[in-house]
Image: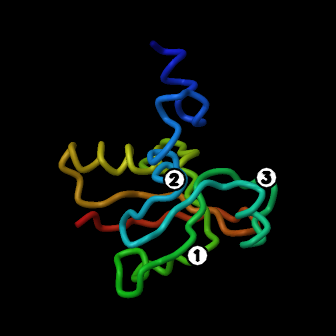
Amino acid sequence: DGEKLAGGEDGTTDEDNGDKAPAVSTAAVLGMTIGELNDETRTKFGIAADVSGVVITDVTKDSAAAERGIQPGEVITEIAQESVATPKDVMDRIGALKEQGRKNALLMLASKTGELRFVTIRMD
């Protein structure tokens, strides 16, 4: 079962082909649209090769993320001091924090050049 689950994340199993695949590549959370950090998004936003995480592709106007100065092209590297690599990781971490009754999420963001900063966002 573990091998089947591990293989499912990259869409190689028959069960995951189809409608589910696009939902994993991008997601909307906390007023941000997030996507996988790949060659295409690195080029589009000019993100350095040594930056890893989940890229923010859009920020909703007047959202909690916009209030904190988060910009498209920044990369979420950690949430609550745990690394994230896919939009699903981000959704899982936010969900876990909400289950714990947390009101805010601490994000570590990397700029396009790799400069790191911490941002706290309200989870409404």
Query: What label does residue 50 carry, if any?
Result: 3
Q: Is residue 13 above or below residue 90?
A: above
How crowded is the residue under tag 2: few (<14 C-alpha within 10 Å), some, or many (20+)?
few
Query: What label does residue 22 carry, if any?
Result: 2
* Image-based side of 103 in relation to 92, left or right: left
- Distance, label 3 to label 2, CA atoms, is 25 Å
Residue 36 in picture, x, y percent from top left: 61, 54
Residue at 47% across, 77% down: 59
> Three-letter amino acid code at disc 3?
Asp
**Marks 3 and 1: which is nearer the front?**
1
Q: Is residue 108 above or below residue 20?
A: below
Q: Which of pointers 3 and 1 lies earlier in the amino acid sequence?
A: 3
Residue 83 in picture, x, y percent from top left: 54, 43
Query: What label does residue 72 carry, if any?
Result: 1
Residue 105 in picture, x, y percent from top left: 36, 58
Q: How many marks?
A: 3
* Image-based side of 115 in relation to 91, left or right: right
Q: Which of pointers 1 and 2 lies earlier in the amino acid sequence?
A: 2
Whether residues under marks 3 and 2 lie with C-beta atoms below 8 angstroms apart, the answer is no
> Three-letter amino acid code at disc 1?
Pro
Nearest to the observer: residue 7 or residue 93 = 7
**Whether residue 81 can be seen here:** no
Residue 28 in picture, x, y percent from top left: 41, 64
- Quadrant containing the C terminus in the rendered view: bottom left
What SS does tag 3 mark?
loop
